[in-house]
Amino acid sequence: MLNDLATSYAGLPDQAARAVNFCMFAAAGLLGAMSRRNNVSITRTQYFVRLSLLGFAIALSGVAYVFTMPAIEHNLYWVITLYPLLVAMVAGFVLGRLSVARALDIGGQKQLAILGFIPVLNLYLLLKSGRTRPGIIRSSSASLLSGGKGILIGVAIIMLGAYTSFNFKTSAFTIDDQQQLSAKLGKIANDLQPMLPITTGETVDLVMIKAARNELQRTYIVYDPAFAFTADSHDQIAAYLCSDPKIALLVNAGAVFVENYVTSQKHLNTFRVSRTDCSH
């Protein structure tokens, strides 16, 4: 059941999935803001450094990419789908609490915390200077986390987070993961072999499938002599494949789908669908 729900969610259009993600993020942010009942405020530098640390923590959460292949192997698609939502909720909760503390420093009104969730307007919380107010206690911090030193530390943390995130996304998969991926693709090819040829369209049959390392190579024979590919054929094929959640998981794990189209007399075209095609 969980896998079915995860598959349905993964099949949502990108805009709908982003909307769900943001709603979870915002709802957790509201809960975080409501849970902060003390009157301790933070300065703009403290806010900036804490936001930098939050961003770095989110970047570190990318280590979960290494569990993609084990999850696929054990049929735990829901884990991969749920994890980003959990990260968004934790990030929203923390941001809500930080934004309340910053809002208290600016104007004493907790309602200003909502600006922390609105692009561009959140700069008001980041840049507006605060001041000591009756009943509001300013959080103390080490000298390194205040003034110009704090800003430099925050920038350094942001750069480290960006580097960490890039590394996780480009090199998170070990040799063992690649071997598991190759084995998974080999199993798919072996399972489909007895079913060939498979009709995939009115004039198109899948006639050959083969796995080679991280590639799943499929060959289709086209029977319509007037058939021709257009300039956007690659994008259409990529969109079709990536709309299948199970294929998208394999591609995001490093698989490459190689789609060969031939007639009985000649080769028509070859399309390669890789991770960059499914990340749009």
Image: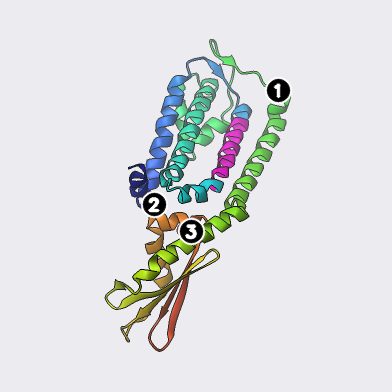
Determine if residue 76 is in view: yes
Q: Which mark is residue 213?
A: none
- Residue 211 placed where, x, y %? 49, 67
Q: Which residues are magenta?
A: 48-65
Q: CA distance from mark 3 to mark 1?
A: 52 Å
- Residue 51 placed where, x, y %? 58, 33
Query: Could you tell me the amino acid type at mark 2?
Result: Asp
Q: CA distance from mark 2 to mark 3?
A: 26 Å
Residue where numbered disc 2 is placed: 14
Query: Could you tell me the amino acid type at mark 3?
Result: Lys
Could you classify mark 1 by the number of other residues whose Cα lies within 10 Å: few (under 14), some (14-19), or many (20 or more)? few
Residue where numbered disc 3 is placed: 184
Q: Would residue 100 appear left or right of 168 to someone viewing this image?
A: left
101 inside magenta stretch = no
SS at badge 1: loop
Q: Which mark is residue 142?
A: 1
Q: Would residue 263 appear left or right of 152 to someone viewing this image?
A: left
* Towards the viewer: 162 or 108: 162
